[in-house]
Amino acid sequence: MIEQILLDNSKDKDITEQSMSNLIYVSREKRRTSPHHFKTGALNDLLRVSATMTNAPTILTLDCDTYSNDPQTPHHALCYLPDPKFRSKLEFLQFPQRFHGINKKDVYACEHKRLYKINSFGIRAIGTKLFRNMIRVFFGGPSHLLLPEMPQLGQNNVVDKPIQSQEVLELAHHVAGCNYEKNTTWGLKIGVRYGLLEVAFSKHSPITHGTLAMGPFMGLAYAQYAFWPIWSISFTIYAFLLQLAFLNGLTIFPKINKKCSIVSNPWFLLYVYLCIGAYGQDLLDFLLAGGTFHRWWNDQRMWMIRGLSSFLFGTIEFSLKSLGIASHGFNVTSKVLDEDQSKRYEQGSIEFGVSSPLFVTLTMAAIVNLVAFAWGNVELIRGSNRRRKPVTSK
C-alpha cells in the first residue's frame, strides 16, 4: 500500500499566497486472500483514511477519468449539505454520468440511456459522482447512531496533529489495510454497502424498507436495479431451455396448424403480442431519448451478454457466500488501451481482451443457439421438399 502527501494545507500555497487543499494519494493494499470489493471497497478505504487525517465533513466521489462540466457544482452541493433544514435527512447529492468518445454504434452500451435518461425521470438520486455527508455515511442517521470500532473514526474526532506526523500516517496506513475490515461492520452497517443483492435481501430492501420510506412506486423503481443480477436466471432459461427442447422434439409454445398456416391455439397470439409489444415499447423509449436503432440493437446485445456473464456469476457468488461457501474471486482487468484496441473500437468491434470464466456460458449459449438455428433451417427445408414432392400412381 502507498500513501503519499502531495499537497499539505499548512505548507503549500498557490500563486496568490492562499493555502491549497490537502492532496493525498492512496494506493490501497490488495491480496488474493482478502476480498477488495472493487470500487466500493476503495471508497470505504478512502473514507477511513480521510477520517484519520482530516475528518472533513464532506466527501466528493469522483473517478480519475471523469470531470464536472459545471464549475459551480461544488458550490451547489455545499448549499444543501450544511443547511440545517436538510442536513438531518440528506446523505448525498448525486450527478448522472455522461460518457465522451463513444463510437457511433456504442457497441458496449456505455451510454446507459435507461439508467440516466429514460428511467431517471421517475427516480431521484440516480447518479455515480456525488458529494457525501460524512457523518451519515459513516454512522447513519441520528435515530440509530453507530459507534465506530476505534475512537479515531468517530464523528467528533478532531485531528489536532499535522498530516505529515508519523502517528497520523501510521493510523491511516492501518485503517487502509486489506485485512482491516475483518470482524467489523464495514460494508454492512458502516460505510458504503457492498453488493446489489446484499442490499436487496437485507432489511433495507427497496421492496420493504424502500416502499415504506418512499412509497410503493418509488420502492419498486429502485428494486429494479437492486435485483438486476437475478435477471440472469430468466436469461439462462431462455438461452438454453427453448433451444434444447426444440432439438429434442419437445413443444413448449402453442402449435400452428400446418395445413392452413393459422394459429390453432389462441394463446400463441399472447406470446406474439408480449414479444412485439415489449421490444416495440423499449425501442420507442430509446428513440425518443435521442438514441438510434443501431445503438438500441447493441444495447439489447450487451444486456443479454451481461445477463449470461457478470449477472449470472454475481448471483452464483452471492448464493455461495450466503451459504458460507468460498467462491472464486475475480481480478481487476487492465484499463490500459493501446492504439490497436482504439482502432477496433472505432470500427465497432467488441474486444474480449483476455480469457475469463465469464465467457464460458456465453460461448455455450452461442453454440447451442447456432445448432438449433441450423437444425431449424434443415427441418424447414425438409418440410418444404415434402410438400413439393409429386404424387404418382402405379
Image (tube, helix red, strand yellow):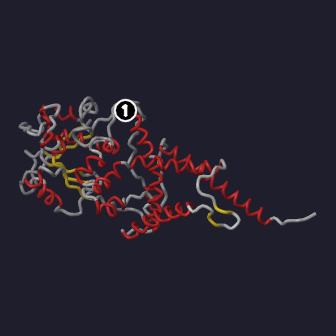
Q: In x, y percent, where is residue 291? A: 40, 68
Residue toward you, 75 or 286:
286
The relative height of residue 316 versus residue 246 in the rendered view (above or below) is above
Residue toward you, 255 or 178:
255
Q: In the rendered structure, which amino acid carries the disc numbered 1?
A: Arg
- Residue found at x 50% / y 47%: 236
Q: How many marks?
A: 1
Quarter containing the C terminus: bottom right
Horizontal arrangement in the rendering, residue 174 relative to residue 354 (left or right):
left
Residue 333: in sight, yes or no? Answer: yes
- Residue found at x 40% / y 47%: 229
- Residue found at x 55% / y 60%: 267
How would you rate the neighbour count of disc 1 (Cα within 10 Å): few for under 14, some for 14-19, many for 20 or more? few
- Residue found at x 21% / y 39%: 190
Horizontal arrangement in the rendering, residue 238 relative to residue 288 (left or right):
right
Task: Identify the residue position indicated by label 1 in the image.
Answer: 32
Q: In x, y percent, where is residue 346? A: 45, 62
Q: In x, y percent, where is residue 54? A: 12, 42
Quarter containing the N terminus: top left
Quadrant of the rendered structure where residue 32 is?
top left
Residue toward you, 63 or 283:
283
Quadrant of the rendered structure where residue 47 is?
top left
Residue 42: in sight, yes or no? Answer: no
The relative height of residue 172 versus residue 60 in the rendered view (above or below) is above
Residue toward you, 207 or 150:
207
